[in-house]
Amino acid sequence: MSRSTKVVIVGAGSAGLTCPYRLRQAGVESLVIEASDRIGGRLRFSPAMPPDRDYLTQRMPIRGKVCFAVLFDQPFWRIAGRSLYSNENMTAWDEGGYDEPYCLSGLVSIPRSRELGRLDEQQRKLAVVAGLTELIGEQILTLVGYYDVNWAAEP
């Protein structure tokens, strides 16, 4: 049985526009939802940028943070009545959706992201999963997929 992964990203700020690019590279389909009438989040330009500014904001790193998406067969956090987890090192939230796999996305704090930026991809994954285990609990170890973006490494 094949399963296609789909992620909903809430907010078209710099993080919300960079994640779909990286998720697509990993073969993950995504949808960005923005409540306002413009993209770019808190980015404001004066004088106004030319019409192709949308391309520029998609490549804007979010100050060297690590962004992650962790996939699960069961949304254990919903069963526990939770949709957001946060501590000084990271924040993780429910991406919504009612089809498998279910997704927790999040950002790692800037100081912790700097530390993770010195690790290779596999070590970074292990460190993020360990941080999520500390934040949320052992259910994290039931993950079926993991993706991250290390914006500190962006050109």
Image (cartoon, rainbow, N blue to C red):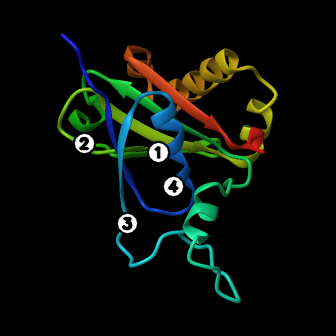
- Sequence-wise, the earlier of marks 3 and 4 is 4
Question: Looking at numbered disc 4 in the image, what kind of residue is underneath it?
Answer: Leu
Q: Secondary structure at mark 4?
A: helix
Q: Nearer the viewer, residue 140 or 105?
A: 105
- Alpha carbon distance from label 4 to label 1: 6 Å
- Which corner quadrant holds the C terminus? top right
Category of crowding for the residue at label 3, using alpha-carbon neighbours closer than 10 angstroms: few (below 14), some (14–19), many (at least 20): some
- Which corner quadrant holds the N terminus? top left
- Sequence-wise, the earlier of marks 1 and 3 is 1
- How far from the left and from the top, in percent, is residue 48? 64, 86
Q: Residue at x 38, y 20 (%)?
A: 139
- Alpha carbon distance from label 3 to label 4: 10 Å
Task: Give the labeled residue for mark 4.
Answer: 17
Question: Looking at numbered disc 3 in the image, what kind of residue is underneath it?
Answer: Glu
Task: Give the labeled residue for mark 3.
Answer: 34
- Alpha carbon distance from label 2 to label 3: 25 Å
Q: Quadrant of residue 113?
A: top right
- Alpha carbon distance from label 4 to label 2: 28 Å
Whether residue 126 sits left or right of residue 13 in the image: it is right
- Alpha carbon distance from label 1 to label 3: 13 Å
Disc number lying in front (1 or 2)? 1
Question: Looking at numbered disc 1 in the image, what kind of residue is underneath it?
Answer: Pro
Q: Residue at x 39, y 76 (%)?
A: 36
- How far from the left and from the top, in percent, is residue 116? 74, 31
Task: Give the labeled residue for mark 1.
Answer: 20
Task: Give the labeled residue for mark 2.
Answer: 81
- Sequence-wise, the earlier of marks 4 and 2 is 4
Count of numbered tags: 4
Q: Secondary structure at mark 3?
A: loop
- Sequence-wise, the earlier of marks 1 and 2 is 1
Q: Secondary structure at mark 2?
A: loop
Question: Looking at numbered disc 2 in the image, what kind of residue is underneath it?
Answer: Gly
